[in-house]
Amino acid sequence: MDVDCRGTAALMLLLVLFNYGASTAHGHDAHWGYEADNGPDTWPELCKTGTRQSPININPSFVDYANIPKMHFVNYNRSHAVTLKNNGHSVTATGFEKWPERPYIYGGGLDGVYELVQFHFHWSALDHQGSEHTLGSLSYPLEAHFVHLKKGMTLNESLYSDDGLAVVGVFFAQGNDGRPLRPLERSLQDSYAFGGGAEIHNFLPFEMLPENHQVFYRYNGSLTTPGCNEAVVWTLLAEPVTVTEVQLNRLRKHLSTSGRLLTQNYRPVQPLNGRRVLFRPHNFDLMFASGGAIYQMSKALVGFLSLLLLTASLM
Ligand SMILES: [Zn+2]
């Protein structure tokens, strides 16, 4: 790939990430999609040739329990304005860089601070599929991606760095509790058309996170849209939040760049190619805090070994 191509790919991604897709309806960005003639099978370059692509299926055989520190979600409990927009590929929420206290994450094994740039959704017309990542080959009907940019990097730099972006994935299970998406529910009706959107004045990011956001899967992967840059440290929160049938149906009414219903906007799972997935279990903090219990256990073990030796010496 020559430098010019890299520059073009970076520009395309910048447009996608920052949701300028609507203003480039006739540009390159409008050409990829999720339909037969422009779907994932036709996506070029790294999407075809990459070796750490996303999404993936989380298969228990490739998961290792890991001693990962707690992840900090800073300013996720602040509320401010976001712009909701249909970019022809998804519904995105942007504007976090204008917040007086911009949400960011650190810890959780991440190398540095990552600032929230935008979030968006992946879904399907059917309830049994829609999420990009799958767990034991099972899908959730909806997955949200909170895209964070490594502090100190430009977006262009981040796209060509191993860990330039940190994306937090949140799964949605269908249920009666519509609270996580309630703040967006009404505005979703204003973004059905390609390029359509609305302002949300008091958006609180924490409302879209599960109560327990310290149990997660971690792996190194890529953007799930062209150019599929292998620059993403993925954090998938294991506990889902809920989405109602009404909310799902509103997402499903969005139109793609071609003006047809965006009936699905998830990329199929990609090969692991030898990658391992790390899992931070729910009882890790407890294990970390319970040195006393481990000491008690070692004492019992020493006692048991002494008894064995004693028994042996008596025989
Ligand atoms: Zn995504």
Image: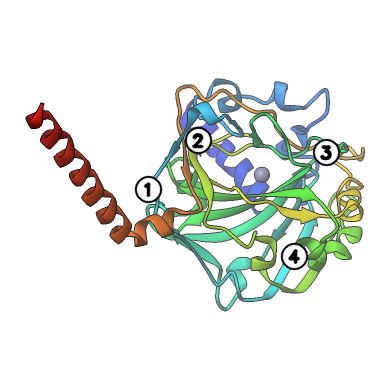
Q: Mark 1 or mark 2: which comes first in sequence?
A: 1
As helix, strand or loop, the secondary structure at mark 3 comes to loop
Spot occupied by residue 142 in the image (x, y as percentages of width and height): 76, 45
Where does label 1 land, which residue? 67
Compared with 202, 95 (above or below) is above
Residue 230's label in the rendered image is 2
Q: Mark 4 or mark 3: which comes first in sequence?
A: 4
Say which of marks 4 and 3 sits in front.
3
- Specify the quadrant that holds the C terminus: top left
Residue 124's label in the rendered image is 3
Label 1, label 2: how many angstroms apart (C-alpha)? 24 Å
Spot occupied by residue 221 in the image (x, y as percentages of width and height): 51, 36
Residue 159's label in the rendered image is none
Where does label 4 land, which residue? 83
Q: Tell me if I can see residue 248 in this picture.
A: yes
Q: Tell me if I can see residue 19 in this picture.
A: no
Spot occupied by residue 30 in the image (x, y as percentages of width and height): 77, 38
